[in-house]
Amino acid sequence: MNCSVYILTPALEREHGLRYILNVMGCKGLTYWLGTFLFDYLAYMLTIALLILFFFILGVEFMYPFLGRITCIMALYGIALITFTYMFSFAFKKSNTAFKTFPLVTFFVFYTLPGILLTISEFVVRSHKLFTTIEVIFVTISPFYAL
């Protein structure tokens, strides 16, 4: 699933002032964010459930012993992905820009850049300490690299 789906709601909310309207109507900020997060997470978990269902339909038997681990890892990744996306949504003023730009930024900055820096540190500079430092930094800030 494209990570832009999760950035659209917070960006639209900020662009149109939806949270202010909901606050005037009595909806607390925590309730709004928790409800939005739970809906996005349920949609994410539905796609994971469909993936596992297709494993059974297609008879991908070599995956059966790992389904519990895959489900657990993907469930935790979903929490990290949605939280990361919500935090990154504040970098955009327009929802359309966020929807179009976020996948490119995440791919190049949080997925490709770590690979390039790690390759340079390992094979060009030949510094294992630098390699480990870069790896720890990107695992900490990027759910895409951590997966």
Image (cartoon, grey):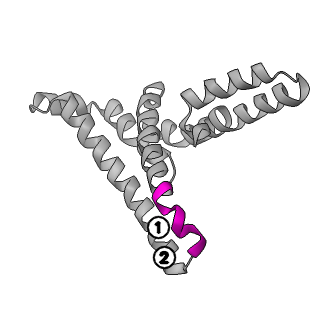
Residue 30 spot, x, y in % from top left = 21, 30
Residue 109 spot, x, y in % from top left = 65, 32
Residue 125 spot, x, y in % from top left = 88, 22
**Vertical relation: 20 (above or below) 53:** above
**Which residue: 51% across, 36% down?**
97
**Which residue: 55% across, 27% down?**
140
Residue type at mark 2 is Phe
Residue type at mark 1 is Ile
**Which residue: 49% across, 55% down?**
69
**Which residue: 47% across, 29% down?**
88
| Circle 2 Cα neighbour tier, 10 Å, few/some/many (<14 / 14–19 / ≥20) | few
The residue to which callout 2 is attached is 56
Q: Is residue 74 shown left or right of residue 125?
A: left
| Circle 1 Cα neighbour tier, 10 Å, few/some/many (<14 / 14–19 / ≥20) | some
Q: Quadrant of residue 83?
A: top left
Q: Is residue 137 shown left or right of residue 27?
A: right
Among all residues in the image, which is located at the extreme left? 26
Check if mark 2's residue and mark 1's residue have beta carbons within 8 Å: yes
Query: Alpha-carbon distance for marks 2 and 1?
Result: 7 Å
Q: Is residue 9 shown left or right of residue 145?
A: left
Residue 57 spot, x, y in % from top left = 49, 80
**Vertical relation: 98 (above or below) 74:** above
Residue 68 among magenta residues = yes
Q: Nearer the viewer, residue 58 or 7?
A: 58
The residue to which callout 1 is attached is 52
Q: Secondary structure at mark 1?
A: helix
Magenta residues span 61-69
Query: What kind of secondary structure does the magenta stretch mostly adopt?
Result: helix
Q: Quadrant of residue 36?
A: top left
